[in-house]
Image (spheres, coloured by chain):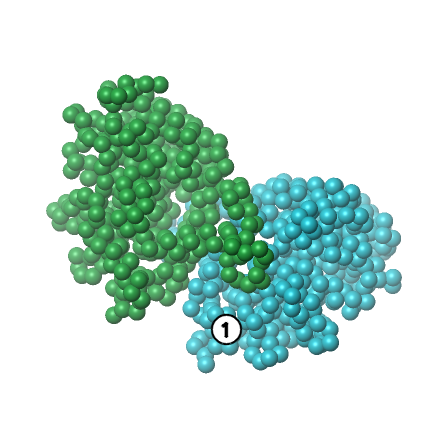
Chain colours: A green, B cyan
Amino acid sequence: MTHHPDHEDAVSQARLREVDSPSSPVERFGVDEPLVLDAGRTLAPWQIAYETYGELNADRSNAILVCHALTGDQYAASTHPITGKPGWWSLMVGPGRPVDTDRFFVICANVLGGCAGTTGPASRDPEGGRYGLKLPVVTIADMVRAQAMLIDRLGIDTLFAVVGGSMGGMQVLEWAASYPERVFAAVPIAAGARHSSQNIAFHEVGRQAIMADPNWRGGRYLEEGLIPKKGLSVARMAAHITYVSEEALHSKFGRALQDRDQITFGFDADFQIESYLRHQGSTFVDRFDANSYLYVTRAMDYFDLAIDHRGVLANAFRRSPTRFCVISFTSDWLFPTKESRNVVHALNAAGANVSFVEIETDRGHDSFLLNEPELFRVTRGFLTGAAHVRGIEPPAADPDAE
Amino acid sequence: MTHHPDHEDAVSQARLREVDSPSSPVERFGVDEPLVLDAGRTLAPWQIAYETYGELNADRSNAILVCHALTGDQYAASTHPITGKPGWWSLMVGPGRPVDTDRFFVICANVLGGCAGTTGPASRDPEGGRYGLKLPVVTIADMVRAQAMLIDRLGIDTLFAVVGGSMGGMQVLEWAASYPERVFAAVPIAAGARHSSQNIAFHEVGRQAIMADPNWRGGRYLEEGLIPKKGLSVARMAAHITYVSEEALHSKFGRALQDRDQITFGFDADFQIESYLRHQGSTFVDRFDANSYLYVTRAMDYFDLAIDHRGVLANAFRRSPTRFCVISFTSDWLFPTKESRNVVHALNAAGANVSFVEIETDRGHDSFLLNEPELFRVTRGFLTGAAHVRGIEPPAADPDAE
């Protein structure tokens, strides 16, 4: 049965095509190659969708895995198949960019639980229909385990680097903790080793907004041809506030009015910030699945690397051969610098090789996605130095030029 | 027509009784006593519900108006008629308390647009039914104008003091700006002279959550016997996060689990913070009206005292005879100290008599409602000193004892 207007139907169909058969490459794992989940269950068959940029060198030593954030996808440096927008990290990843695809082979995979081609709640359930809430809840470690199986399939033993911001940074830390011998260098950006109480609170607001939408139907909306648009939009609006700093909102919008000279004494979007937030909400629902939002926020909430290592974070990194570059932003209030500093202290306590940079910016958590020259300089410098140690050839035109 | 279960009906009926005929005193203004609104319209008839504590002295000089915050009411120091809980400021207001009802005559009125007996969107529309969105949008200045008409009716010319936190503090500032000769002393706490972009953003999320609830019915839910419970609950959850500090959430909840030893790999409230937030949301809907939430948040968003005074905040306070005590809290991120400091700078520029105290606490914005000894000490000290200047007799038992 269907209740929705045609536009929703078209958007929904386009998204479901990407879920089943993404525009990017996809690796499929059969019933004999199950993914073992922290929830105590296995998933099979399952699939993982990914993009690659650059070329794998002869000794397979130049692969960088880029890990995406909550609502990201594999299209780090390529056009998004639904929105038509440039890749979410095209400033960071590409020829001559800090993550230089002339030198490195870059892999970016959609996370487990996502909705861009890797198995998630919108995927077909082998028992019929689509998973919805029948998919087991997944964790950051599950996402990383899935990526490791992809890396195996691609014939790569050791990653030169794992790089990512926000939830991507959580995956970086999990990679280093779970597969220390497979990670030469790690760059967790604007992240932490656990999700704070306040962050769980914001996620819970978003989940409640989604589940309050009558179109959510206990998670079975895809079966019924519906989209819990309003709930997902509210969830995105609430989350978006946490991605930017108060200073950035103030300098970008202040109390400026939207296309009007005076307040209208009503509930329309009088203020630019209101109009901006509504836009963030309404465009998000066209590209993201509501149940995936539940699953991926839950994975972040559950992340607590210390708990997984007998309560001591340093245990996660004992005898780690990985070299780390931990990066935070001064105005990030979602993952404030103290979260990164906790990671650095643990790495130091574990005797790991670590450098730490706090970047001064007023643009908040989302700085890792923006044009932040200092972020690019630090990332480029760290990767170039590590590549030299690792013996990865510089690009022909640029012999490690400083 | 009615769609709701019996409990909602009972709660809804109890709330509507309070809207029409509150448990507290109420002053009614007839069609010949209209309230002039900033929206360019008038409201008549209208009513204002209030509580008083203590006794007005012979020369009517000892009256203190207490202004409540977004979801507060007139029951500052008396039992709430619906929840049965103690007054929201019973730590601050009462015999021997900082706002000492043995010495002062304390008035607290429900704000215009509220839902505890003062005219608001849940009130009866003289043209039939209940207002809903037909009520003009109101402002902080409108709320204060309504309070001034109440004070007139009570035969009080000059208030000894106006005191309030958060939106209550906005009213305090508006009182001092609109009626400087009628305010001897002013105590704005955890407030500012305008609502910031980030604060508007959080309010907009809340409003969108309410308006996304299909039970909201374009604001006509009361007519249809419905309550947009889920939307209002999500709005409250989002707002509640802003009332507390990250430190307070961390120390109170951290990542502690709720009545379980392990995460459940599901979407129940595994974490205490989730359970706590859900409780905040669900209890709120029993005592507050969804449309009132729209109106009162809008009034806060519209507040910008500088804009009302040719763009210069100091103009609002030129030649002010009022003595001010401005109070902020270090961990308040909804109205951070810089907002109070802006007010203090303007007061200084206007040549006003002002003292400013930033109180060190990790409990965030809601500190003004909590047991904060330093807040009580500062408020008591300021009011006692001002009362001495004003010639208000100390209580018999306590001759201004230090």
Tell me the kind of residue under disc 1: Arg
**Is A139 on the left or on the right of B94, as rendered?**
left
> What x and y, as percent, mark residue A157?
19, 30
Residue at horizontal 61 percent and vertical 49 percent from the top: B367
Q: Quadrant of the C terminus of chain A?
A: top left
Residue B286 image point, x, y percent: 52, 67
* Residue ID at (52%, 72%): B11
Dot 1 corresponds to which residue? B220
A23 vs A66, nearest the viewer = A23
* Residue neighbourhood size for the residue with mark 1, other residues' Cα within 10 Å, grouped as few (<14), some (14–19), many (≥20): many
In which image quadrant can residue B214 be found? bottom left
As drawn, B14 above or below A161:
below
Disc 1 chain ID? B
Can you tell which quarter of the image residue A230 is in?
bottom left
Taking the spot 54% from the left edge, 53% from the top edge, the residue there is A257
Residue A72 appears anywhere in the view:
yes
Where's residue B80, x and y in %? 62, 66
Q: Is residue A393 above or below residue A85?
A: above
Give the SS element for disc 1: loop
Which residue is rendered at x = 48% and y = 34% of the image? A361
